[in-house]
Image (tube, grey):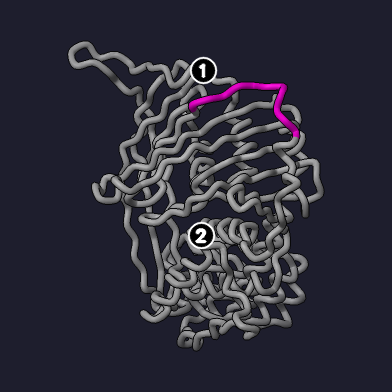
Amino acid sequence: MPMIMAQESEEYPLHRCIFQGDVKTLKILIGTHDIAEKDKQGNTPLHLAVMLGRKACVQLLLAHGAPVKVKNLAGWSPLAESISYGDRITISSLVRKLKQQAREQMEERRPNLVAALHQMGDFYMELKWDFQSWVPLVSRVLPSDICKIHKSGASIRMDTTLVDFNDMRWERGDISFIFNGDQKPSHSLTVLDNKAKLFQRVRYEETELEIEDEVDILMSSDIMVAQMSTKSITFSRAQTGWIFREDKREMVGAFHADFYQINGMVLESRKRREHLSEEDLQKNKAIMESLTKGSSQGFKNGEPPVRRASLNPPPKSNITWDEYVVAPSGQCPLLGRNLVYKESSKSFKATVAMSPDFPLTVDMLLNVLEVITPFKHLSKLRQFVLMKLPPGFPVKIDIPILPTVTAKITFQEFAFRNDIDPELFQVPSDYFEDPMRNYGAYLTMMMVLHTASCARG
């Protein structure tokens, strides 16, 4: 047994340096070892540095490009653990690095994405969203929406009336989201408010004020994630008929489609709130309401905003490195605060209609969705399409959006066209840039929170 313990102690040298607070040795080893290596608990060196409050180690790891969007076996990211620990400087550093890494990954994919869009024919497409719920009172007030998508060259425009959607609240508008792939990054994403005749460029780099606003939101919110588990999903042909059963085939719009039952679809929801007080929960509601109305906390009456202070650190862990490294996989010793944790799951019965006749391929759809996924409900669609679907194109889909809400998406119209008006992808001359109604920051925030949520769980 002592030999086994000694052998395991020699593994994960970066993890060991961090656990023991040995910054000097970490500096020596960091250039020659895998900075993203996971130990038996799925923790990277950055996970451990955050959970143990090794602030100097955190900054050193981030300076060497340690990945922020990575999960341990428990399903949490370094960002989630930093929120639990509660050190504001550490959270800010991780948010900045997360954004930087997301931009770098986007720029790496950008040439291939733009090339793929150019190779694709120009088209017009409509997606109809019908939101439904098994809760009767919720079901009565749920919205519907039709997203209209134009594509020309490497440019995509999406028109929508549903800007944001949560369980019992949604924000309506008349919004256009424009991506011009051939433009430089600072001008490639634009949001139009067609009612107010305003526009805003979605910046790649946020201001210091926006970063700090996001940190306030993270520090005052549940660490939570709702995700669709695909581990046990299977597809079986849907049947029709009372006596003589046969495979269900119907027309969806102009397209023949085979219907499949989706079995084993489970929406899993998990949340942590050990870093929050009851007062925090009430304040958080006010913050989120102001952001969804297009305003930022910002400076009020010339006064700087009151920022969330760092929490007192959790009690120092008494776990030694030798105890940690031999702990069974999936049974990580407690290194931070006692978890205040809740999880739930709901099974869904759903269907998908696959058409061999639809002119667009699934790969083409994924390229389009990659551009427009800042809208939360469209990111859910992209997650679904990434699953191993039956043959054909998914012209009609049921997708769980929230534990109580399902969306039915229908590709009700599609046509390749060579007469798409190029002016659709330009800002109209009578629109004014409005730095106050920050749609760009709002979309960026939603994308960051979604990314952070995915990284958490």
Q: Mark 2 falls on what kind of element?
A: helix
**Which residue carries the number 2 mark?**
453
Residue that protrudes farthest toward the front in the picture: 430
In the rendered structure, which amino acid carries the disc numbered 2? Ser
Q: Is 396 placed above or below 242 here?
A: below
Q: Nearer the viewer, residue 283 or 343?
A: 283
Q: Who's the residue at 37% across and 16% down the image? A: 249
Q: Is 210 placed above or below 71 here?
A: below
Question: What are the residue bounds of the magenta stretch?
Answer: 412-422
Give residue 270's quadrant in the image.
bottom left
Q: Characterize the local packing of mark 1: few (<14), some (14-19) or many (20 or more) Cα atoms within 10 angstroms.
A: some
Q: Who's the residue at 18% across and 13% down the image? A: 243
Does residue 421 show up magenta in the picture?
Answer: yes
Q: Who's the residue at 75% across and 42% down the image? A: 181
Q: Nearer the viewer, residue 187 or 121?
A: 187
**Could you tell whether 88 is left or right of 84 in the image?**
right
Percent coordinates x, y for residue 149 in the rendering: 60, 35
Does residue 365 show up magenta in the picture?
Answer: no
Q: Who's the residue at 29% across and 20% down the image? A: 239
Residue 3 in view: yes
Any mark on residue 192, and which? none
Q: Is 448 placed above or below 297 here?
A: above
In the rendered structure, which amino acid carries the disc numbered 1? Pro
Percent coordinates x, y for residue 454 in the rendering: 52, 56
Q: Is 314 placed above or below 61 here?
A: below
